[in-house]
Image (cartoon, coloured by chain):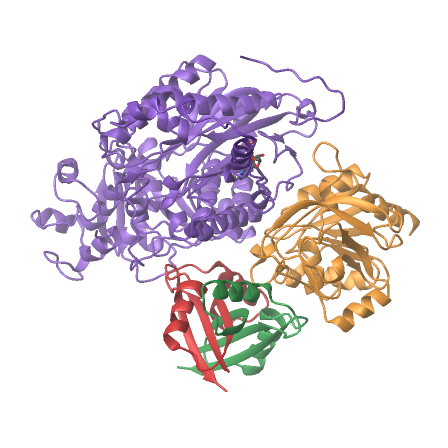
Chain colours: A purple, B red, C green, D orange
Amino acid sequence: MTSASEGLSDLDTGPGRLANRLDTVDLAASTPDDEQPYAELGLEADEYARITDILGRRPTTAELAMYSVMWSEHCSYKSSKVHLRQFGDLPPSDALLVGIGENAGVVDVGDGYAVTFKVESHNHPSYVEPYQGAATGVGGIVRDILTMGARPIAVMDSLRFGRADAPDTARVLPGVVAGVGGYGNCLGLPNIGGELLFDDCYAGNPLVNALCVGVMKHEDVRLAKAEGIGNKVVLFGARTGGDGIGGVSVLASETFDAEGPAKRPSVQVGDPFTEKLLIEACLEIFAADLVTGIQDLGGAGLSCATSELASAGTGGMHVDLDTVPLRDSTLTPAEILMSESQERMCAIVEPAKVADFLAVCEKWDVLATVIGEVTDGDRLTVDWHGERIVDVPPRTVAHEGPVYERPMRRPADLDALQADDAAKLPRPTTGAELQAHWLAVVSSPDGADKTWVTEQYDRYVRGNTVLAQPEDAGVVRIDEDSSRGIALSLDGNARYARLDPYAGAQLNLAEAYRNVAVSGAKPLAVTNCLNFGSPGEPEVMWQFAEAVRGLADACRELGLPVTGGNVSLYNQTGDVAINPTPVIGVLGVHEDVRTRVPSGWRTAEETVLLLGE
Amino acid sequence: MSRVVVDVVLKPEISDPQGQAVLGALGRLGHDSIRSVRQGKHFVLEVDGTPDEAELKQIAETLLANPVIEDVELQLTTD
Amino acid sequence: MSRVVVDVVLKPEISDPQGQAVLGALGRLGHDSIRSVRQGKHFVLEVDGTPDEAELKQIAETLLANPVIEDVELQLTTD
Amino acid sequence: MRIGVITFPGSLDDVDAARAVRLAGGEPVALWHGDHDLKDVDAVVLPGGFSYGDYLRAGAIAARAPLMQDVVTQARQGLPVLGICNGFQVLCEAGLLPGALTRNSHLHFRNRDQVLRVERADTTWTQDYETGQHIVIPVKNGEGRYVAADADLDRLEGDGRVVFRYVGGNPNGSSRDIAGVTSGDGRIVGLMPHPEHAVEDLTGPSTDGLGFFTSVLKAAVNA
Ligand SMILES: Nc1ncnc2c1ncn2[C@@H]1O[C@H](COP(=O)(O)OP(=O)(O)O)[C@@H](O)[C@H]1O
C-alpha cells in the first residue's frame, strides 16, 4: 500500500508534473489533463470527479491535499453520518446549550455553569508508538474542550488491549498508560476513571479512548467560526513540522498494517508543557474577550481549521502560508496544510484586539502569528510565495463532503453465536471443579485490581476530586462555595455488542448511567466513541448501524441528549475486525457533592438491599 | 570487555520539546550564540568478550530506540 | 557554525534504574553478553561562529548536568 | 499573614497551595516567576507541577527563573520557604536544599496516599506536628527519588535535617526513606508529598496537611 505521504511527495516531482514547479490555481486551469495521485491519497475516482466538478478545473496539489484529508473517513464521517443523524433527531433537552456539530456539546449544569465533555480515540497511533500515541490522544481531546471556551478540569481513559499475557501487550500497555499519565499529569488534569480490558481481538489494534471534561460560565461558550470581514486569523502554539502528514488518511482511515517508517513520520511527539501554556493563554484570552471564533488544530491540521472556521462563518478567508512558523523549512505548501503537528490553535481576532492577543501569548511564551484574515465573499484562498495555490468554497471541503449509505448485512455467524449461550456450558460438579472455576473468574485480568494503572495518574491535582478510583463514577467539584459538582462514567462492553449490537449499546449506556446515578448525581447527557472495523465490510456496517440505533433509542427512553462523540473505523487486523466496541460516557450533576455516595461498605451493621429484578 | 556507546536521537523531522525548553532557558540566561539544541539518550553498555556488532546493532535499533521516531549511532571501543 | 555534543552520565555511585531496566530486558531477550547498562543524556548544540569553550563548559556543567549527581563530557566539532 | 505562591510556566498545584493557605487562615499572594517582586510576603510556597515540562531535569529550568534569584537571596536571610514536589526539586536545583531528586526507582509516576513520619517538629513549617507523629498525605511524582552521596546523607542525618520519612513503603526508592529535608536554620523545607492535597475531608485522604500552613502562620506571628 502506498502511504499518503509518499503519494504527496510524488505530487511535485512525479510523472505528469513539471518538476519543482509550484502547482498554482492558474497552472491547474491551464493543465486540466494532468494526472493526479488521488487514489494514493485515499480518494475514490468519483470523489475526485466531484472535486473537479466543484472547482470547474482539476484541483491544485494543495487543494487535492486538503480535500483528501478532509474527505477522509476520520474527518468527514462519510460512512457513519447517515446513522449518526439519529442522535441529532433526539427530542430537545433543556440542558443542552450547544449540540452535536461543534467541537464538543455544552450542557447546562445549573448556577450559570456549563460543562462540555467528549471522548476521542487514538487507536492506531497508539499501536505504532504507544507512549506518544496515547499522549497526543489526550492532548487532542483537551484542545477540543478548551476550544469551547472551557477550562479542562478532568480526564478519563478507556483502554483495550490484546490478551494480558501476549508479548506485544507488554510493549503496548505500559507505553499507553505512561503516555496517558505523562500528558494528563503534566497538564494538571486529574484522571477520575476509565477502563482497562483485554481481548484477543485487540491484539493488533488496541483501543485508546480519552475523555476530557471542562467547565465554564454560560456566557463564555466559544464557537468555531470566522466572522467579521477584516478580522485576523491567528495561528498560535507550536511550530508546524513534518509530523503526522498523511496521518489522517493513513493512520485513521485505512486498515492498519505495520510497514516500517515512512518518509514523513505519521506519529507525532506530544509536548504537554506547550499545551499547558496554550490552556492558560487561551483562558486569559477568553476572559479578556479577545476572540470572535476559535478552533484547535487536530487531524488535518490547518486544512481542517481554516476550512471549518470559514465554512461555519459568514464570509471567506484568506491565508498567507509563508507566514506559518515552520520547524522544518523543507515542507511543501501541501504538507504545511496537512501537517498534524500538535499543540496548535487558530483564532479569529478583531484587528483592534490583535496587539492584546499577542501580548497574552507572549506572557505565556506561546508563539502567535497572524496568518490571514476573514474576507468578503465565500472563498477560502491560500497564497504561497505570492501565488495562489488554493481557491475553494470552504463548505465543500469541511461540511459538504461525500456521504455514503454503505451496504449492511447481519453477520452470518450471529445466530450460532447467540444460540451458544452460557446455559449450555457444563456446570462444575466437584469441589475441585468449582474451585477451578472460581479461580479462573477471580484471576481474570479484566476483573483484576487496576491500581498499577491508576497509580500512574494524578487524581488529586486541582484539589476538587471528590471521587476517583476505585469508584464507579468520577465526581469533581466545580464550585467551592456552593459545592456544585459533576459525575462522569465511561463504559463499554464489546462482548455484549458482539452478541447483539443494538442491546449491547443500550446495556453500555445503562451501565454508565447507573454508575453516575448511584454516586448521587442526576444524569444529564451522553457522549460516545464508536470503535468498529472497516466500513467496507457489510457486517461491520450492520453492527455499527445497530449500535447507533440502540444507543439513540435508549437515550430517547432515558430522556438524555447525545452531545457529541467520535467514530473510529478500520479497527481491524488483516480481515478480522475487532468486536464492535461502543464506549459510552454519561455526565451527571450534583447540586452538592458533599452528599455523594461512595461505593463499598463503610460502617458495620449497615443494611444491604438489592434493587431491581 | 568492551564498551559500546549508543546515542539515540530524535529524527530531525520529529519535534523535540525538551531541546526546545533547554534552548529557551539558554536564551534567557544570555547564551545567545546557541542556535539549536536537540536532546537524546546516551547509553553505555559493557559487553563480555568481543562484541557481536550485528547483535548490538539490532539491540540499538529495536530496544534502545523506536525507529519510527528515533535514529541511533553506535560506537564500539574494546579495552 | 559548530556542533557541540554534550553527554551527561550519572556519577558511578548514583544508582541508575533506567539502565537497570534495560539490562533486565536484554537478559530476558537472551542477550546474555551485556554485563551492564547505564543511561544518560545526549545533547547536540549548534553554535553560531567559533564556540567559546569556557562558556560551553559552564553551560554543560551548570545547566545541562546537575553536578550533585551527574558528570559531563564535551566534544566540539567545527564544520 | 501574606504567603506567596509562585507560578512558573507549568506549575499545577499553585491553586491548591493558595487554597491551603486560605483554609489555614492566611492570605495567599500570587507571585509570577518572571518578575523580580516578592510583594513583601512573609513566606513563600513553591508549588507542585511540571515547571517547564520537567524537561532537562525536574525543576532545573525553573530554578534559574528571575524570581528565584530573589527567593535565594531572601531565603538566605531567613525568609521561610516551602517547596512541595516540583517546588522541592526547584529548591535542590537552586542549591537552597542539599541532594537531588531523580527518576523513581520503578520508573513509573506514582500517586498514592502515603504515611509519613514527622522527624522534626521544630521547623518553621512543622511546628504544629509532634516529633514521631504519623500523617497521611498524597504523594504523586515521577522523579521523587531523593539521592545524595552517602557521606552527605550521613551528615544530613547527623545534623537532623531529615524532616519526613516514608513509612509503610517507600514510593520512589528515596535513599533512607527520606521524604523531606530542611535547611540548617529550619526555615526552608522541601518534601515530595503534597500537604496541600490533604486539607479538606471532601477531597483529600485526611486533613493532615493543614499543619504546614498553620505552622508557618504561627511562625510569622511570633517573628
Ligand atoms: N484506564 C483507566 N484509567 C483510569 N481509571 C481506570 C482505568 N481502568 C480502571 N480505572 C478505574 O479503576 C477502578 C476499578 O476499575 P474496574 O476494575 O474496571 O472497576 P469496575 O469493574 O467496578 O468498573 C474504577 O474506578 C475505574 O474508573
- Report whether A392 appears left or right of A144: left
**Residue closest to the far front:** A430
Which one is nearer the viewer's eye here, D54 or D171?
Answer: D171
Residue at the image position 32 percent from the left and 43 percent from the top: A252
Residue A331 shows up from this direction: yes
Q: Position of residue A594 (x, y in %)?
A: 70, 25
- Report whether A314 appears left or right of D1: left
Q: Quadrant of ligand 1?
A: top right
Answer above or below: position of A70 versus D159: above
Q: Position of residue A494 (x, y in %)?
A: 40, 31
- Report whether D44 appears left or right of A396: right
Which one is nearer the viewer's eye here, A172 or D220?
Answer: A172
**Residue closest to the far left:** A33
Quadrant of the snapshot with the N terminus of chain D = top right
Residue D40 shows up from this direction: no
Q: Position of residue B77 (x, y in %)?
A: 46, 83
Which one is nearer the viewer's eye here, A161 or A244?
Answer: A161
**Residue closest to the far right:** D222
| Residue A18 occupies quadrant | bottom left
Q: Position of residue C55 (x, y in %)?
A: 57, 78
Figure disc tally: 0
